[in-house]
Image (spheres, coloured by chain):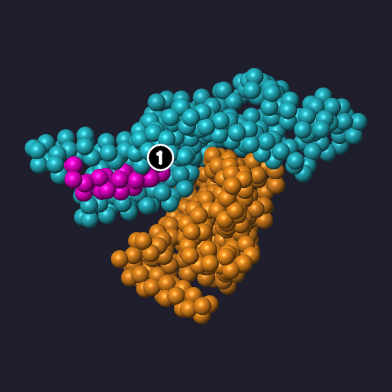
Amino acid sequence: MKQYLIKRVLLAAGILFAISIITFFVLNIIPGDPVALMLGDNADPQAIETVRHNLGMDKPLVQQYLEWITGFMTGNMGESYFQHKPVSSMLVTSFGYTARLAAVSYAVALALGLSIGIIAALNRGNAIDHTLMTLAVAGISAPSFWVAIVLQIFIGLRFKAIPISGLGKPAAYLLPCLSLGMRYAASIARITRTSMLEVMNQDFIRTARAKGLSRRRTVMVHMFRNALIPIITVVGTDLTTLFAGSMLTESVFNIPGMGALLVDNITKRDIPVVQGGVMVVAMLCVLIYLAVDLLYAAVDPNIRLGGDR
Amino acid sequence: MGERNRDASRGYYQESWRVLKRNPVAMVCMIIVILLTLVAVLAPFIAPYDPNAIDMPSKLKAPCPEHLFGCDEMGRDILSRCIYGCRISLSVGLVSQLIALVIGYFMGVCAGYFGGKVDAVISFMIQVFSSLPDLLLAMALMFALGRGLANLYIALGVLSWAKTARLIRGTVLQLKQKEYVQACRIDGGSSLRIIMRHLLPNCIPTLIITVTMGIPSAILSEASLSFLGLGVRSPMASWGAMISASKMFIRTSPFYSLFPGFCMIITVIAFNMLGDGLRDALDPKLRK
């Protein structure tokens, strides 16, 4: 177990290192000089040179990378080209919005998805099951930003109490979280159903019923607990795409989160901000995968007790 | 022996086709996919109007007999734009997945076949690429490459190779143990010969499934990027870009947002369900 733990943590560190290299070089080898863009079309070449020098852009790329990554590790991600604010403080502000949106949405998704999955499994083959699973397929296939707009049209514009932009009032969470949560609810419902059906036919369930446990207790304690392992994996993968999904939702509801920050600064070509944002999200994703793997190892004796992986 | 091999594989695909034909959902989805492909290919002949023809007097006109889906904020016919959007979506899906297939097959086969250090390096790369959310990496790539259709093909192709590579690696690891591969190697067959003659044909079912399953996610990624303004250049009619433009007019013209979204859902569901059907039909383990 200890060996596995060390191996897994080292791997995560290696992945992060590789991601930092990819991010840096993808973002810095771009056609079009951001400085020329910053100073406008008629800027004099001398001035461009001076600004490039001040920003450290005339140094070799490898040196720039090393300076950036050492700064990143100490929490200093540089300064925005245009807003002259430290990138880290910009990220903290917008990350707050994204994190709140993502957390509430996922809570909605878990509640909806798990109950729909269990209900569908218990009704296997009949009309309830078919309806729920058709809805789930539609939920997976519909782009979340479109669902968001549809909810705005059919709910937001009808009820004055439900705002369609920002995250100011608690009621403002309703539509963004519903639209973002729906997609995940659908995938959780599908995997919960499959996983429950697999457990359902096993001997220990029959034993539990035979020894006189109530149907409710059998379902919730014996079946659901054993069905959880595949669900954990899906939750892990979901959490990583959740950040990406929330960027789109933010754009529909004018929420100034990470998505808005990244898109804005990609358009402006403000490299330090984009770089910092991409790296922070990537880091979170790698940490989530690490957590899921370790959780898995703790639950699954095959990994815990060795084996070659 | 080559003859017999070919016969056996023909039998396998005939059998798969038979299984697929008995799956009504998959068949309906296949017909939808064929129709969508026809719409995409024949767009200039089916579209009632030029998708980019501006006609300010009929701006935001509601659906009517002349404009079945209505008109957008510049009076362009939404139906025609949806038809041309189908072209963009399908081409992005197909081309990006073919790029992913070539890179993914090559990397997966090398990892699975050569093993050792090659496998370690490639597996690490697969893990790096799969730890990033697709959209984030796509955004970074579009930042570097700039907007445009060709760049979308590249960005979405580059970011989906890892899935293909992982599956191919797994398949090759199993195939490597088979007698006919061993026999070819003992016989002095070169690695290239084994990879192209023996491994490739046996990886085709896996490749068919990954491409079919990859297309809808590429379509969704393209729409997301275009929605964020990082995809196609205007005035190109992409479904994502149309939905993004319609955001401003939900109060007055809700139809504008709805139609491109319906097109997208139908396309994505059709590919997803067809992919499910193909997986059931092509996987001998699932066959009764």
Say few, some or many: other residues with alpha carbon within 10 Å of mark 1 (under 14 / 14 to 19 / 20 or more).
some
Residue A153 lies in what quarter of the image? top left
| Residue at 38% from the left image edge and 30% from the top image edge | A298
Q: Is residue A189 magenta?
A: yes
Which residue is located at x 53 percent, y 53 percent?
A: B169
Q: Is residue A40 left or right of residue A166?
A: right
Give the percent coordinates (x, y) of residue B6: 50, 77
Q: Please give left or right for residue A181 compared with residue B175 in the image.
A: left
Instruction: Locate residue B243, reporting x and y percent.
Output: 52, 49
Circle 1 SS class: helix
Residue sitting at x 33%, y 41%? A113
Three-letter code for the amino acid on which mark 1 is drawn: Thr
Task: Give, as a single range, the part of the protein colored magenta.
Answer: A179-205
Of residue B223 and residue A240, the one placed in the foreground of this image is A240
Q: Residue at x 44, y 75 (%)?
A: B8
Q: Colour of chain B?
A: orange
User: Residue A237 versus residue A247: which sits nearer the camera?
Assistant: A237
Say if A1 sits above or below B286 in the image.
Answer: above
* Most frequent secondary structure within the magenta stretch: helix
Decide if residue A233 is on the left or right side of residue B242: left
Q: Residue furthest front?
A: B186
Above/below status of B168 relative to A267: below
A189 to B284, vertically: above or below = above
Residue A112 appears in view: no
- Disc 1 designates what residue? A233
